[in-house]
């Protein structure tokens, strides 16, 4: 099992995500774990908090309605170099993970990540790897998430999405009509 560090005397945590229900649930869960949580839903709000009251810990969503969460990571790194930052995203890719780490993120997690995964990433020692998730996404769920991401990137155009995925349009329509797998 991975050895975790203590939260420490400064328990301030910035949560930045534009998914309001997720943000509220995560804030409650992190408060129960001993953090002093401050939330933001936009890059502008996150930047203002990072500038005025740089926290000891931060969890930033990558894609936000008004920009990129990595902009807030850069401000945090500048204002508080010792801040431990985890970047969350529903669009997991190697390129974005590398970009997040280059601008100063401590770790990078793909959604859906629960509070335990996030705490493990925030408190892990630099020289140890965080433990694998307790309930990783199934292969069907990963495939479904990828299809949804491409569909959104194609502005919800079924024909263009099917072409890019090298898939028959009707097959794609059937997949999109179903609920997400677990």
Image (cartoon, rainbow, N blue to C red):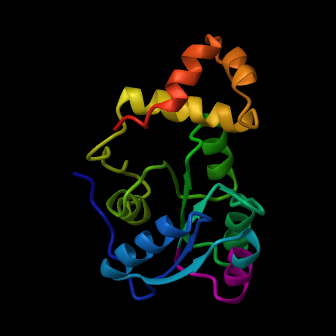
Residue drawn at x 75%, y 32% as measured from the top left? 154
- In depth, the one of 182 and 75 nearer the eye is 182
Residue 86 appears at what percent x and percent y? 52, 60
Q: Is residue 85 left or right of residue 157?
A: left
Q: Is residue 28 above or below residue 165?
A: below
Report which quarter residue 19 is drawn in. bottom right
Q: Which residues are magenta?
A: 46-57
Residue 29 appears at what percent x and percent y? 35, 73
Q: Is residue 113 above or below residue 82?
A: above
Residue 7 appears at what percent x and percent y? 37, 77
Residue 140: in magenta span: no
Q: Is residue 76 above or below residue 31?
A: above
Report which quarter residue 165 is drawn in. top right
Residue 116 appears at what percent x and percent y? 32, 61
Tell which residue pokes out farthest to the left in this image. Answer: 1
Q: Is residue 138 left or right of residue 112?
A: left
Report which quarter residue 88 is drawn in. bottom right
Residue drawn at x 44%, y 50% as measured from the top left? 112
Q: Quadrant of the C terminus?
A: top left
Residue 54: in magenta span: yes
Q: How many marks?
A: 0
Residue drawn at x 33%, y 40% as measured from the top left? 136
Residue drawn at x 56%, y 40% as measured from the top left? 92
């Amino acid at each position: 099992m991975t050895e975790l560090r203590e939260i420490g005397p400064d328990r301030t945590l910035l949560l930045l995500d534009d998914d309001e229900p997720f943000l509220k649930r995560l804030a409650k869960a992190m408060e129960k774990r001993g953090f002093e949580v401050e939330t933001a839903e936009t890059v502008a709000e996150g930047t203002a908090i990072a500038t005025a009251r740089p926290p000891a810990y931060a969890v930033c969503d990558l894609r936000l309605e008004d920009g990129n969460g990595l902009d807030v990571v850069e401000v945090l790194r500048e204002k508080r170099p010792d801040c431990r930052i985890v970047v969350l995203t529903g669009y997991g890719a190697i390129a974005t993970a590398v970009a997040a780490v280059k601008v100063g993120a401590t770790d990078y997690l793909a959604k859906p990540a629960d509070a335990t995964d996030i705490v493990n990433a925030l408190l892990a020692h630099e020289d140890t790897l965080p433990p694998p998730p307790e309930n990783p996404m199934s292969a069907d769920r990963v495939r479904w998430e990828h299809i949804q991401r491409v569909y959104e990137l194609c502005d919800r155009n079924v024909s263009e999405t099917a072409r890019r995925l090298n898939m028959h349009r009707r097959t794609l329509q059937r997949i999109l009509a179903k609920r997400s797998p677990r």
